[in-house]
Amino acid sequence: MPDRQFKRYRDNITFTYYGGHKESPYEFKVPKTDVWHVVVEKGIDSKPLDLTASFTSTQAQTIKRTPPRSIATSLKEADEQMDHEAADASAAADEEEKD
């Protein structure tokens, strides 16, 4: 659960979580960047469950974002921007081929 929800869980306040009763292995994709907590409840005090839990995490895939284009003030400037972007895309494709 995200950090804010974990604090609510810890303080015994209504909280939101992802998951539920799941069989092993359980894969979860984090829907947003945040501090996340994995909570494994072993039942209740009067009826504890006999279980073992472990988890691994993998690094998220980085998405390369390009800054938005500036607004062209003329058709000539728009053409120059498009030419520049095409050259950048071509150079990036060449770099990927080298890898």
Image (cartoon, helix red, strand yellow):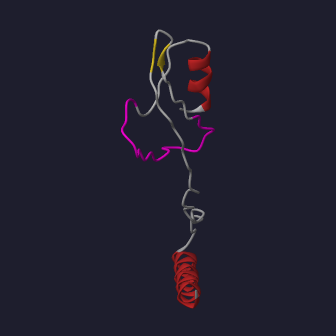
Tell me: 48 left or right of 84.
left
Tally of numbered tags: 0
Question: Which stretch did the figure color magenta?
Answer: 20-37
Residue 95 colored in magenta in the image: no
x, y percentage for residue 17? 47, 28
Which image quadrant is residue 80 in? Answer: bottom right
Which image quadrant is residue 6 in? Answer: top right
Determine the main secondary structure of the stretch shown in magenta. loop
Tell me: 25 left or right of 52.
left
Q: Toward the viewer: 57 or 76?
A: 57
Q: Toward the viewer: 1 or 81?
A: 1
x, y percentage for residue 69? 57, 66
Q: Residue furthest front?
A: 50
Residue 22 drawn above or below residue 83: above
Residue 29 drawn above or below residue 60: above
Q: Looking at the image, which residue is at 37% across and 30% down?
A: 21
Residue 67 drawn above or below residue 11: below
Q: Toward the viewer: 27 or 23?
A: 23
Residue 22 colored in magenta in the image: yes
| On-image quarter of the C terminus | bottom right
Q: Looking at the image, which residue is at 59% across and 37% down?
A: 36
Q: Looking at the image, which residue is at 50% across and 35% down?
A: 52
x, y percentage for residue 91? 58, 86
x, y percentage for residue 95? 59, 86
